Image (spheres, rainbow, N blue to C red):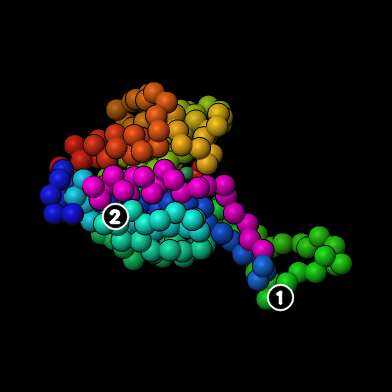
Amino acid sequence: GESGPLAGKHILVTAGPTHEPIDPVRVIANRSSGKQGFAIARAAAAAGARVTLIAGPVSLPTPPGVGRIDVETAVQMRDAVMGALPADAAIMVAAVADWRVEVADSKLKKGKGPPALEWHANPDILAELGEHPDRPGLLVGFAAETNDVVTNAKGKLERKKADWIVANDVSGNVMGGDNNRIHLVSADGVDDWEDLPKSAVAQRLIEKIAESIA
Ligand code: C5P
């Protein structure tokens, strides 16, 4: 985009789940439709930003004007994010798998009984950005919580050195749904939003980001 409140800005968005392979046919994944992240990428592009959307495996069309990089795993997502820097703002919406396993070269056979998997921690992309020499000017994380929503979000804000955490109450019917209930947590306090469609959450968030990085 050439005009709009985010003209001249580069906005990085992650969205969707990651898939961590177990063997050539099986994966470990988080539940994430990618809808909220894609809506944010769409709103950022409509506001005139250059948008890099780094997407895990989802079946969603690329929003108009958005540059999309598809990845499968958390490590690939991390590498794509770091490769896309510098950015004026980064909005980490992806539901990244916390762990991956040592991948078997061939399909694990049922007859051998349940396999023992060797687990490794995945990189925390948001936390790595928080400490990166090219840290985006505004760093926004998401936190899907079912309980103690705001308390947990405040912990994440500090631990991951983010500027805002968009805390998402997923105790209701949010996963895969079209609405979201948001608490925007920052050093300034907590802003409770009413139940909104994901497109409206995206719009409001992009307006706040435009004010913040203008
Ligand atoms: O710790 P938790 O997964 O709840 O934190 C959620 C936030 O951190 C989201 O913004 C998510 O995109 C980001 N995250 C990440 N890399 C991970 C795990 C989470 O960027 N490995």
- State the residue in front, 13 or 165: 13
Q: Residue at horizontal 34%, vertical 45%?
A: 40
Q: Is mark 1 within 8 Å of ligand 1?
A: no
Picture coordinates of residue 153 (x, y %)?
45, 34
Position of residue 203 relative to residue 189, above or below, is below
**Is there any visible trace of residue 119 in the rendered image?**
yes
Residue underneath mark 1: 106
| Bounds of the magenta segment | 26-46
The three-letter amino acid code for the residue at tag 2 is Pro
Q: Residue at horizontal 13%, vertical 54%?
A: 2
Quadrant for residue 147, please give it.
top right
Query: Residue 45 colored magenta?
Result: yes
Residue underneath mark 2: 64
Q: Residue at horizontal 35%, vertical 61%?
A: 68
Q: Residue at horizontal 40%, vertical 53%?
A: 14
**Element class at badge 2:** loop
**Placement of the C terminus among the 4 image quadrants:** top left
- State the residue in front, 77 or 39: 39
Picture coordinates of residue 9 (x, y %)?
19, 52
Quadrant for residue 47, please give it.
top left
